[in-house]
Amino acid sequence: MDMPAAEPLVIPGNWNFDYRYFAGDTATRFFAELRDNARIMGTRNPVTGQVMVPARSFSDADYVAATEWVEVGQEGRLEVFSIIATQFPGLPAPPFIIGYVTLDGADTAVLNHVTGVDLTDIDRAARQLLRQPRVRVVFKDAREGRITDFHFEVIPDTGTATGTGAA
Amino acid sequence: MTDPVAILGVGQTRYRRRHSDKNTAELVREAAAAALADAGIGLDGIDLIVGGVAPDALAGLANIDLMSIARPGIPYMRINTGGATGSSALLAGMTWIAAGRGKAVLVVAVERMGHATTAQNIFNSIFDPIYEKDISMSTISMVALRATLMMQKYGFTSDHWAQLAARNAAVSALNDTIERPRVFTADQVRGSAILAWPIHALEACPTTEGACAVVLTHAALVGDRTPAWIHGTGAFSDTYAMGDRFHRPEGALDNLITLERAARKAYGQAGITDPLAALDMVEIQAPFASSEVMAYMALGLCTPEDNVAFTERAIAGTAGVAFQPSGGPQACNPVSATALIRITEAALQIRGRAGARQIDGIRRTLSTGQGGATQFSTAVILGAEKP
């Protein structure tokens, strides 16, 4: 039987579930130190000596429990970065910088927002950040025990990498 | 290796922004039926189906594979390793045959992200909710972080990324599986909006749906058909945490240690000592130019010292091996299927069935898969000769 061609049917749908993520005892303590003492704490792998920041209860590579807590420095090196320059759904208004920083005394890098660079000229800002500058931790006054309790601020005129790639 | 395993048939839907004229099972059937016909095997000859689907949330269907890929009367399992899902699914199927559990496996990977009205929101949800998700990461900035590392460490410039993107786009025009190939110049890339420096809007592949299917068989079922033979495979995993990969003794963030190990294992099985000389064609599961360039080193195609010069030869088409004859994932990246497409494209080239994008004399190929922030890597070497 001949049927008239129809526009493909589109049935609306939506996923909107709420969750609560259990952070575990180690992350709970890491965040409590941020909130209550403005300290950044790592955990040490007793076999390799590696200090993990943010703190983890065990090393991913070998499953070894890391139970010793160590405070790390509040300055470090910006390892890698990106400057987000377009509005993404659900993310903050651009431009802003994110990057991984190895804090002094740590052997892993922690992701956070980075400030202290003029973003009116994105390429110019990128050239500065390609030099892997030193950064310092800046804590919020009103901390709530989340990774957003601090961010990194570039220390002017630091960085040693050649950063030849900004053209 | 155990008895040889062959790719006897492949099938692909076209890849387009949305297949609004098909539900997911219909999309799967189109690719699966094409692969079965290509192999000359009926569904009743299949001993196992392996389904490949990355996050359910992209399609908004919990159990998307159970309702669209699993078939009555046939054992079934699903694989999810992010962007490496398709190749991981193929390796699972191959292992099933090698273990003597059956002689014919249908591998199907399907991407249904057109269902999502804001797919980027879902990509933003893949990060660790305890330590990282609040820092506004996206899948694009995740790649951008590494691109800046390549620029710092080796002296790559934004021009390299733009030129490689333009090269891949130009090649994709010959690929008739892509409904609307985008062709653009390096200047147009540089002139497009910065998404996450150094990545520009034209470098980000468009939303793509589609399904890809492969029929794998034991050598005994090949008969007088023309297969592509599996010569070597490797698959390795890494930590989820990118921040753990800066200072460890081996496997810095730019080294793609999982890909290096996967390739080394596959080369060993295939008896390859000089990959640049042995391989005719390479399909790299690299959704961005910087990811493709990182793979050159990991695959042993160039040294770290020669990385920039090698990339420039790859852009010029004089690197000594055909890269991404399909246009690669920069042109078309249906996430769940993309790593299986890399293998399918290699099989088509070896069997001389790649249509307008066919390159003469392809005898040996390498296809890679990359999932997560290169948490998972796979390497699959195919050849025209029975191993």
Image: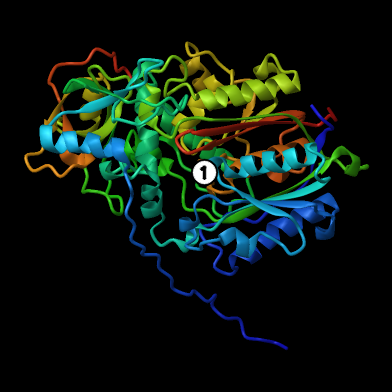
Q: Is residue B65 above or below residue B290?
A: below
Q: Is residue B350 above or below residue B262?
A: below
Give the position of the C terminus of chain A as an image quadrant: top left
Q: What is the secondary structure assignment of the residue under circle 1?
A: helix
Q: Which residue is mark 1?
A: B82
Tag 1: amino acid:
Gly
Residue A9: percent from left, percent from top: 52, 76
Can residue A139 be seen here? The reply is no
Residue B7: percent from left, percent from top: 78, 41
The residue carrying pointer 1 sits among few (fewer than 14), some (14 to 19) or many (20 or more) residues within 10 Å by Cα, namely many
Q: What chain does mark 1 sit on?
A: B
Can residue A94 be seen here? The reply is yes
Task: Residue at 54%, 46% (x, y): give it.
Answer: B332
Residue placed furthest toward the bottom: A1
Residue B179: percent from left, percent from top: 58, 55
Residue placed furthest toward the right: B224
Q: Relative to the observer, which residue lies in front, B159 or B370?
A: B370
Task: Residue at 75%, 59% (x, y): give it.
Answer: B33
